Amino acid sequence: MRLPTWIAQHLAALRAVLVFTVLLGLVYPLALVAVGQLPGLNHKADGSLITVGGDTVGSSLIGQSFTDADGNPVARYFQSRPSAAGDGYDPTATSASNLGPESVVDTIATDPEESSESLLTQVCGRSKSVGELNGVDGRRPYCTDDGVGAVLAVFRADGLTGPVTRVVSVNQAAPATPFVTEYEGVAVEPAQPGEDYVAAGGVVTPIRGDAPADPAVPADAVTASGSGLDPQISPAYAELQVNRVARERGADPAAVRKLVKEHTGGRGLGFMGEPGVNVLELNIALDKQFAAR
């Protein structure tokens, strides 16, 4: 007996669902797993994990911090770039800060937990710290000596024009001493917590200062990557750290530079991106060759 057309159509659809479920839900995934276990591919397929003495210490694809329990950098290790992923290099919270070049004014609230730093102040503070750690000039344009954004809110008699009537250093809270004493003949005030000087009509005015145009601290030492998980730093940032790491380990700087070169990867496909130094792999090699004092 011939089945009704609508039943035949439903049976054909059911058969198609079963066939594609087996092909795409079982055969295809299992085939990819099998291919991923081929020699030369299995390491990457398993997450590019790195083991030392039988213990997994990380992945060559995911960066990590080399800090102590208080979050201070451990001087005998090369330091990674900053990370905005969770508390730093958290693979479950990969993200960027979403702060851009116009983020130059800090939020100074009466409740410290509600305060937040602008991207400029974060960069200034990081550059100052990196400079102090590595014994170089950490100054940058538009940064104060105490490591915040050198930004003024300038009030004028006619809004955007006219004589200056008031000037506030918006990133330096009272009782801090402003980084400049006066601007166009008007004394500069420190910021008061809870005040929004931009909303009150102040014109945001960054001050360049006398920092060198080409900072000693490279950009990747003071900015986070888009993912927050970048395992590499630039050769320039690695070079900045060589003398400090060599001193802490009692090693010849030339030998440390040789290790840096060995762990520097080239551009993708020979032309994409920039060369990078894998920090985790480099620090593991350091521990093997130069035991910490």
Image (tube, helix red, strand yellow):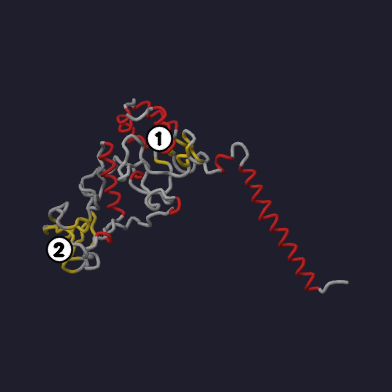
- In percent of width and height, residue 97 lies at 37, 55
Q: Residue at x 40, y 31 (%)?
A: 287
Q: Residue at x 80, y 70 (%)?
A: 8
Q: Residues within 10 Å of mark 2 (few under 14, many from 20)?
A: some
Residue 253 found in image quarter: top left
Q: Residues within 10 Å of mark 1 (few under 14, many from 20)?
A: many
**Looking at the rendering, in which quadrant would you find the N terminus?**
bottom right
Counting residues from the start of the chain, the first of labels 2 and 1 encountered is 2
Residue nearer the viewer, 187 or 12: 12
Type of amino acid at the residue the image marks with label 1? Asn
Type of amino acid at the residue the image marks with label 2? Arg
Mark identifier at residue 166: 2
Q: Is residue 92 left or right of residue 171?
A: right
**Looking at the rendering, in which quadrant would you find the C terminus?**
top left
Mark identifier at residue 283: 1
Q: Are marks 2 and 1 in contact (CB under 8 Å)?
A: no
